[in-house]
Every structure is written in C-alpha cells, then in structure tokens.
Amino acid sequence: MLIVVPWTATYLVSWLNGDYPRGWVAAAVWAVITAPVLVVAGWPEPPRRKRADPPYEC
C-alpha cells in the first residue's frame, strides 16, 4: 500500500504543476493498480492452523 500510493501522487502532482503534461495518464494507470492493492491490504489475515498432536504408540 505504501509503495503504490506515492507513485500515484507523484505523477498527479507533476501533472498539476505542469512538469509532466501526460502525468494524468501515469496517475490513472497507477490509480487503477492502487485500488486492488488497497482492497487486498484491508483483508484480515487467515487464521493459523492449530498443530495436531503427534501420534502416540503404546
């Protein structure tokens, strides 16, 4: 999450400042990549499996 959001913001700011005229395209591409990353990052961790007791022989 912390990797893709700065890329999107950087291209968006560079386009708004006029430094990169087609920055909106790069910002749109990174925003499309950012959306699923934010969704997946919000998912809870899967529960851990409990260890099974070792088989005991008598």
Image (cartoon, rainbow, N blue to C red):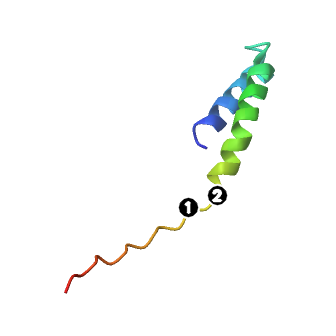
The quarter in which the C terminus is drawn is bottom left
- Marks 1 and 2, how far apart at CA: 7 Å
Q: Which mark is residue 43?
A: 2
Q: Position of residue 52 (x, y in %)?
A: 37, 75
Q: In which image quadrant can residue 7 be found?
A: top right
**Residue of label 1:** 45
Q: Within 10 Å of the Cα at label 2, are there few (<14), some (14-19), or many (20+) other Cα atoms?
A: few
Dot 1 and dot 2 residues touching (CB under 8 Å): yes
Q: Position of residue 47 (x, y in %)?
A: 53, 68
**Left or right relative to 48: residue 51:** left
**Looking at numbered disc 2 in the image, what kind of residue is underneath it?**
Trp
> Residue visible at 58% across and 37% down?
3
The quarter in which the N terminus is drawn is top right
Reply above or below: 7 against 2. Answer: above
Q: Which mark is residue 8?
A: none
**Left or right relative to 24: residue 44:** left
> Residue visible at 79% across and 12% down?
21
Q: Within 10 Å of the Cα at label 1, are there few (<14), some (14-19), or many (20+) other Cα atoms?
A: few
> Residue visible at 28% across and 76% down?
54
> Residue visible at 63% across and 35% down?
4
**Looking at numbered disc 1 in the image, what kind of residue is underneath it?**
Glu
